[in-house]
Image (cartoon, rainbow, N blue to C red):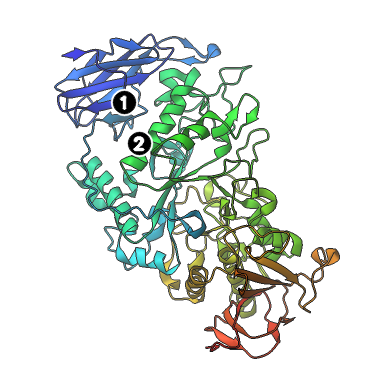
């Protein structure tokens, strides 16, 4: 028996007596709900959503219960020239489906769920922005090759929740993991035909459903596998929270997995193509492609914006995640005239009582016109800073960044982020991420090697600011290997010491290589899986030292430095190796780029503490004159030696290395 039901919430929801269905479509002439057998193969019955409230079709199925398998049929005009792609022969996936299964032909179906997970004592870490250290990882790639993880758990949410995984993160000083997409996704037909998969997952099918392929074998095989997968994800979040680690999800609200006009019709296109997507105003058969992935969600439409808000709230309220990294975030704020920092979606997030307190991180660009918007997001947002990435690479790797450019990036990119209300933590500082060369490959290859992706080595970045320091790829040459490691150490130290929010890409501490593939989005194999053989190696040890140094001392302030000295603000002095204050010509001297930074930290008028940061990007050692009086060396990336007093006012900084020293008042014991 059916009744009109309610228009809210959208999707299919069990209330204890039956299931309410609510579906958005402004242009449909009718919406049917199709009920299937437990495998989703056989159509058992169907009924029309007889009630309509504005653009929401709704109905209630009395006696229906969790476990019900369903799909949608949308009736309406087939008129691509007008942007309409209705086809009542197709069974479509509910965009709000909490759980997705596939019939024997691979068509997606929704399953009604009932969630009553007991979070009990989950303790949200809620780290302040200034204290945040991010580790970007892929759930599967992180543990697939870890010999300390039971084989049946490798590559899963459960593996990330294990004490050994969490301890590794804690040693690195990580306060937040940024997980590559965990939403259920669709593998493009082109990849499937080549025997590949969309490993990264930036091709979302289920915006409310965790990806089952990232769950353990036991959860996937459970009688109620969907619930087991959700519970495994939640238990992972709870374990990370208990260790003080926040969980940030990489989310893809710029496009869907339906692709361009030649792509599959799975859900949104068949329900209301003209409203879900932005269509070319001249040729509505084609899509605006600001995402570069074939289509672009029409986030200016209130129902599409509602969809995004509902999904975000679900992952916070029901799954307890702590924030989101928005892929190609410029799409989120595009209006009729381009990017708008006051766009409705951004303002909706800012005022929402569930979302206002979580971390929001923008990838601040898309591929559309004027899509590069670094520094333009609202005050509470973090932004991936590719200007930091490129300048730091050019300073340490290719040698063509000046001291001036390096200094700007070291000090929070104030030229970009110092607008009212913003702070240095707005800048997410990184030198490598999932997208591009790994840290090891950055110093091992000048050219990408992406042939395994099946795109003729045309995909991925062509301009990487990388070098091989003597020969392309792997080598046994001890001197080349030494130079490569020194540069990797200097890069990691710069990320962790700079003002801003540091982000370390998975495996940077373990010499992870993708053999020169700088776009491993479709490589679900050892190219992408983290090799754990370097645990305890020198880079791992350096990361541990850097974590301790940052947590205990934070040599560079968490706030902006001021132009004029004052008793209340930390100040900087920029010196040449000879101890002279840098003048205009020094900032742009290509021949001498070594740099001394004296940080004067004033806690009170009569109290101060000084740090010295020394940077030498040259292939030979450089002598530095230190200011008086006494110093304790906290870090030396060339030697990784334990902290020790410096007994001379003149020190040699080894090639391609960083040192950090702290002033020791004469009255104190220097040890």
Q: Is residue 206 visible?
A: no
- Residue 654 is marked as none
Q: Is residue 390 left or right of residue 257?
A: right
Q: Could you tell me which secondary element the residue under label 1 belongs to?
A: strand
Label 2 element class: strand
Q: Decide which of 380, 588 is in the foreground and name it.
A: 380
**Image height of 42 relative to 407, above or below:** above
Using the numbered discs, state the Cα–Cα distance from disc 1 to disc 2 in whole angstroms: 11 Å
Compared across the picture, whether 450 is left or right of 38 comes to: right
Q: Position of residue 506 (x, y in %)?
A: 47, 60
Q: Residue at x 47, y 23 (%)?
A: 302
- Does 581 sit above or below residue 344? below
Residue 222 position within the rendered picture, expressed as x and y whole percent measured from the top left? 19, 46
Judge left or right: residue 514 versus residue 17: right
Picture coordinates of residue 509, whole percent (x, y): 49, 67
Q: Residue at x 46, y 38 (%)?
A: 203
Residue 11, disc:
1
The location of residue 23, given as percent across then percent down, is 34, 20
Q: Which quadrant would residue 151 be assigned to in this image?
A: bottom left
Is the Cβ of the residue at disc 1 closer than 8 Å to that at disc 2?
A: yes
Q: In the image as oriented, which residue stretches furthest toward the bottom?
A: 647
- 598 vs 4, left or right, is right
Mark 1 or 2 closer to N-term? 1
What residue is pinned by disc 2? Answer: 208
Name the residue at 64% across, 16% down: 282
Q: Residue furthest front?
A: 605
């Amino acid at each position: 028996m059916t009744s009109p039901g309610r228009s809210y919430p959208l999707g299919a929801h069990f209330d204890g007596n039956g299931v309410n269905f609510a579906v958005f479509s402004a242009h449909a002439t009718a919406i049917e709900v199709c009920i299937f057998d437990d495998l989703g193969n056989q159509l058992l019955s169907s009924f029309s959503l007889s009630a309509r409230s504005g653009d929401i079709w709704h109905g209630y199925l009395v006696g229906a219960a969790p476990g019900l398998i369903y799909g949608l049929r949308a009736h309406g005009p087939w008129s691509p020239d007008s942007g309409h792609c209705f086809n009542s022969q197709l069974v479509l996936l509910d965009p709000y489906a909490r759980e997705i299964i596939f019939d024997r032909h691979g068509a997606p179906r929704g399953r009604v769920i009932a969630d009553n997970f007991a979070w009990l004592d989950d303790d949200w870490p809620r780290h302040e922005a200034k204290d945040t250290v991010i580790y970007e990882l892929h759930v599967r790639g992180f543990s697939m090759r870890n010999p300390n993880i039971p084989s049946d758990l490798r590559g899963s949410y459960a593996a990330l929740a294990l004490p050994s995984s969490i301890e590794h993160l804690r040693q690195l000083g990580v306060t937040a993991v940024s997980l590559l997409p965990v939403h259920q996704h669709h593998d493009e037909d082109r990849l499937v035909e080549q025997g590949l998969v969309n490993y990264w997952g930036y091709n979302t099918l289920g915006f409310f459903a965790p990806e089952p392929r990232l769950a353990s074998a036991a959860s996937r095989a459970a009688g109620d596998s969907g619930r087991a997968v959700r519970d495994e994800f939640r238990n992972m979040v709870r374990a990370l929270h208990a260790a003080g680690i926040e969980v940030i999800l990489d989310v893809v609200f710029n496009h869907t997995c339906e692709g361009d006009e030649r792509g599959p019709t799975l859900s949104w296109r068949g329900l209301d193509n003209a409203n879900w997507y932005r269509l070319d105003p001249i040729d509505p058969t084609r899509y605006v492609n600001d995402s570069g992935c074939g289509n672009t969600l029409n986030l200016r439409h209130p129902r599409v914006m509602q969809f995004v808000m509902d999904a975000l709230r679900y992952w916070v309220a029901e799954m307890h995640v702590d924030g989101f990294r928005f892929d190609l975030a410029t799409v989120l704020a595009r209006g009729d005239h381009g990017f708008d920092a006051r766009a409705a979606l951004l303002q909706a997030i800012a005022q929402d009582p569930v979302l206002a307190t979580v971390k929001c991180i923008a990838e601040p660009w898309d591929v559309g016109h004027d899509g590069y918007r670094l520094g333009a997001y609202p005050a509470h947002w973090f932004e991936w800073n590719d200007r930091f990435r490129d300048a730091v690479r050019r300073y340490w790797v290719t040698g063509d960044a000046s001291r001036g450019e390096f200094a700007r990036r070291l000090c929070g990119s104030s030229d970009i982020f110092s607008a009212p209300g913003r702070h240095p933590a707005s800048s997410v500082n990184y030198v490598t991420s999932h997208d591009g060369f790994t840290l090891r490959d950055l110093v091992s290859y000048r050219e990408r090697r992406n042939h395994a992706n099946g795109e003729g080595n045309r995909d991925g970045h062509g301009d990487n600011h990388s070098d091989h320091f003597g020969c392309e790829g792997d080598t046994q040459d001890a001197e080349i290997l030494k130079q490569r490691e020194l540069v990797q150490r200097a890069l990691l130290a710069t990320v962790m010491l700079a003002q801003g929010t540091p982000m370390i890409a998975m495996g940077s501490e373990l010499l992870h290589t993708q053999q020169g593939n700088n776009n491993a989005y479709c490589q679900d194999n050892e190219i992408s899986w983290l090799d754990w053989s370097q645990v305890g190696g020198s880079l791992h040890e350096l990361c541990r030292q850097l974590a301790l140094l940052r947590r205990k001392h934070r040599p560079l302030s968490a706030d902006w430095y001021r132009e004029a000295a004052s008793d209340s603000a930390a100040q900087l002095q920029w010196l040449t190796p000879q101890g002279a204050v840098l003048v205009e010509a020094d900032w742009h001297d290509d021949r001498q780029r070594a740099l001394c930074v004296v940080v004067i930290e004033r806690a009170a008028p009569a109290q101060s503490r000084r740090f010295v940061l020394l940077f030498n990007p040259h292939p030979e050692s450089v002598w530095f004159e230190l200011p008086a009086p006494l110093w304790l060396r906290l870090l030396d990336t060339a030697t990784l030696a334990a902290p020790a007093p410096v007994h001379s006012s003149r020190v040699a900084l080894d090639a391609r290395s960083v040192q950090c020293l702290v002033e020791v008042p004469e009255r104190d014991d220097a040890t």
